[in-house]
Image (cartoon, rainbow, N blue to C red):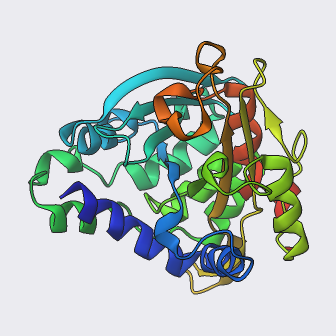
Amino acid sequence: MLDNILDGLMQRYKERVPDVSAIIEAMIREGIIENAGDIENDHIAFRTMGVEKLGIQSLEKVFLHYGYQKKSHLFFKEKKLDAYWYAPPENRYPRIFISELRVGDLSESIQKIIRSYTDEVKVDPVSRINLDDAVAVDKYLHSGLWRTPTLEDYDALLAETEYAAWVILNHYYLNHFTVSVHNLPEGFNTLEEFNVFLKRNGFKLNTAGSEIKKSPDGKLLQSSTVAEMIEATFADGKKKMIAGSYVEFAERKVLDQFAHLPKEQIRREHRRDGFETGNADKIFESTYTSQTKGN
C-alpha cells in the first residue's frame, strides 16, 4: 500500500513538473541510468499550514501509520517555519520531510487571510480517512482542503510569505523529490559533477547561498532546480504564472567510521543521514521569486 501511495504522488508530480521527465531522459541519453527505476529517491517533501487540525501533526499520521519514524526537528527563524523529517520503514523508500508555516508569527492581516481558508477545515481530515485504503490516502493527498484563493489574497500572501502563497494554491501537492547523486556511476556521482551535467542540458539551478548547499560537517551536499512557472486560475477567474514544484539532488558522503569499507559494501546506513537547517533554508527558495524570475 505504501508503494501505491508513493507511486500516486510521483505520477502527479511528474505531470506537474516537466523537469522531472526531462532530467530522467537526459540521464538515459547520456548513459547515466537505463531507466527511471535506477534512481534512488533520497526524500520527498511536503509543505503545510501550521494551524489547528492541519499542519505536521495531521499529515504525519499518514506516514507514521506506514512505519515511518519521526526524527529531528528543524526551525527556520526568518522563514517562520518548523519541520521534521521521517525515516522510512525500509531503506528502499524515501525519507519524508514535512514543514509547516508558523501562522501565528505572521502579521494579523496575513493570519486573517490564511485562516479565512483553513478555517473551512472543521476536523482533522486525516481522522476521516481509512489509512489502510491506499486509494483513499492517494485521493486525499491530491485533493483541495479549502477553496481556491483569489488573486488578491494570493498576492497579499506572496508579499509577506512566499511559502504561504505556495501552500494556499498547491495544498499537499508534492513539493519535490530528490535524486541520490552518490549512487550514480562515476563521473556523475558527486554533486559538483552532476550539476555540470544539469547545466549542460539547460536546467536552471537554485543559486540561493550557492549552487551547492553544504552542511557544516561537509557530508551533506544539496542542490535543486528552480521551480517552473505554471499558469494558475484563481477564484475570481484571473490568471497568473506561479511557481510550481522542482527537483532536488543530494550527495550524502560516507561517515568517517565507515571510510574503510569497499565501495561495493557501502549502504544507506553508512552515509550521512538526516537534514541540515542551513541547507534546507536555501532549498526552500527554489519556489521564491528571487529564483524564478526569468524562468
Residue in the image at 48% along x and 20% along y: 72
Residue in the image at 8% along x and 54% along y: 130
- Is residue 126 something one can see in this rendering? yes
Residue in the image at 25% along x and 45% along y: 62
Residue 178, image x and y in percent? 59, 53
Where residue 201 sits, quadrant-wise, is bottom right
Residue 220, image x and y in percent? 70, 31
Position of residue 33 relative to residue 178, above or below, is below
* Closer-to-camera residue (47/174): 174
* Closer-to-camera residue (149/285): 285
* Closer-to-camera residue (129/52): 129
Position of residue 209 relative to residue 145, above or below, is above
- Is residue 274 something one can see in this rendering? no
Query: Left of 142 or right of it: where is 112?
Result: right
* Closer-to-camera residue (11/61): 11
Where's the N terminus, which quadrant? bottom left
Residue 117, image x and y in percent? 43, 55
Position of residue 80 relative to residue 282, above or below, is above
Query: Left of 284 or right of it: where is 167?
Result: left
Residue in the image at 72% along x and 26% along y: 219
Position of residue 65 relative to residue 143, above or below, is above
